[in-house]
Amino acid sequence: MSLHLQRDLEKLKKEVLKLGNMVETSINNAILAINNRESTFVDEVFKHEDVINDMEVKIEEDCLKILALHQPVAGDLRFIVVVLKVNNDLERMGDFATNIAKRAQELMKHEPLSTLPEFVNELPDSVRTMVRYSLDALVKLDDVLARKVIDMDDRVDEINRNMYEAIKAVIEESPAKTDIAMSLLSTSRYMERIADLSTNIAEDVIFMVDGRVVRHAD
């Protein structure tokens, strides 16, 4: 590997980690906005939305420049391919954090709706853990940690399905609460999608480490 390529790859890695940390912060603030019903957390999410989008564009441009200038092969090429995918996944996570914050704004206007305990506690904790583990796995190229993220996804899916049934019951019992109930269900779905994207990153780490594609494995 040339010194110029090594330098550019290190810079790229730092940029992705910076984006990941910012997205993780936005997700945490969005979840705090839902659970604590505080608008200051919503403001923090909105404040970083454009910054995250701009960073995603810059990282993509840097990846394309490296491909054009250095024509990397083997492990270096795999790394850049993974960065392109992770970069897109992180930006989408930021979008979902913004969506959660918007729903939090609406929910704050109404009395809290009783819901599943696992939605309030377990789901947010699991999602935050998956995001953190996936980023740590990327930094350390840790395929064992990446597999832990993948293993956690089924429980998140289960909680989201249970939320659907719980919200359905609320609407059947109190049709007047339909709008607020659907907003709450949307936040569960957005958290589930963030977990899916964390799983994507974990799968990409495994690809980067050993070249195996596990996304469609049984």
Image: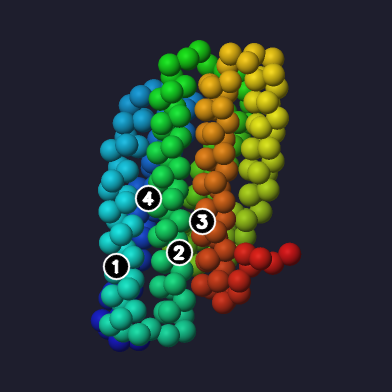
Q: Are marks 3 and 4 in contact (CB under 8 Å)?
A: no
Asked whether residue 51 is in view, the answer is yes
Residue 196, image x, y percentages: 57, 51
Return the residue at label 4. 21
Residue 94 in the image: above or below residue 72 = above
| SS of the residue under disc 3 | helix
Residue 71, image x, y percentages: 35, 85
Q: Are marks 2 and 1 in contact (CB under 8 Å)?
A: no
Q: Residues within 10 Å of mark 4 (few under 14, many from 20)?
A: some
Cα gap from disc 2 to disc 1, whole angstroms: 13 Å
Kind of residue sitting beneath label 3: Ser
Return the residue at label 3. 134
Kind of residue sitting beneath label 1: Glu
Return the residue at label 1. 61
Please tell me which of labels 4 and 1 falls first in the chain.
4
Q: Residue furthest front?
A: 175
